[in-house]
Image (cartoon, grey):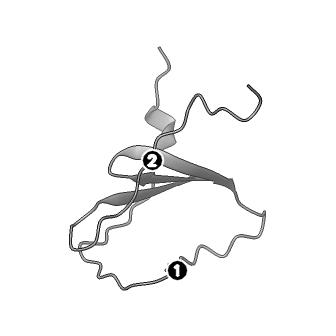
């Protein structure tokens, strides 16, 4: 079946509930996690500004507890 999805999982934000999200940027790759699940990956342009914008189709949201830090990939181990 050509239009069947074998890796589909519906994930969203529920009104009135707190939800954690995480953005990881490694070189030109941005990963977006919602409730500790990888939702989307993006390839950034070479001249990415580092600015972050959030857009909502409808409704409103509040944010707290923002943190940012540099990722140290020099200590990463494979295996």
Which residue is drawn at the image coordinates 29% and 60% (left, top)? 20
Q: Work out which residue is located at the far top of the displayed protein and give it.
A: 79
What is the x, y in percent for residue 49? Answer: 66, 76
Spot occupied by residue 8 in the image (x, y as percentages of width and height): 53, 38
Q: Earlier in the sequence, mark 2 or mark 1?
A: 2
Q: Please, what secondary structure does the residue beneath circle 1 have?
A: loop
State the image quarter where residue 25 is shown: bottom right
In the rendered image, residue 67, in percent from the top left (x then y), is placed at 32, 68
Give the answer, above or below, for where 49 lies relative to 29.
Answer: below
At horizontal 29% and vertical 78% (from top left) the residue drawn is 63
Q: Nearer the viewer, residue 73 or 10?
A: 10
Residue 36 in view of the camera: yes
Is residue 49 rendered to the left or right of residue 65? right
Crowd rating for badge 2 (residues with CA inside 10 Å; few <14, some 14–19, many 20+): few
The answer for how far apart the CA atoms under marks 2 and 1 are is 17 Å
Vertical position of residue 49 compared to residue 27: above or below? below
Which quadrant holds the N terminus?
Answer: top right
Residue under circle 1? 57
Nearest the viewer among 37 and 14 is 14
Q: Which residue is mark 2?
A: 10
Residue depicted at 61% across the width and 50% down the height: 41
Q: Nearer the viewer, residue 32 or 26?
A: 32
The residue that appears at 43% across and 51% down in the rendered structure is 33
Report whether 40 appears left or right of 46.
left
């Amino acid at each position: 079946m050509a239009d069947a999805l074998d890796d589909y999982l519906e994930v969203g934000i529920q009104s009135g509930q707190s939800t954690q999200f995480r953005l990881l940027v490694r070189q030109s790759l941005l990963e977006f996690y919602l409730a500790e699940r990888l939702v989307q990956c993006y390839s950034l342009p070479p001249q990415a500004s580092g600015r972050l914008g959030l857009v909502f189709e409808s409704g409103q949201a509040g944010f707290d507890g923002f943190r940012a830090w540099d990722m140290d990939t020099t200590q990463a181990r494979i295996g």
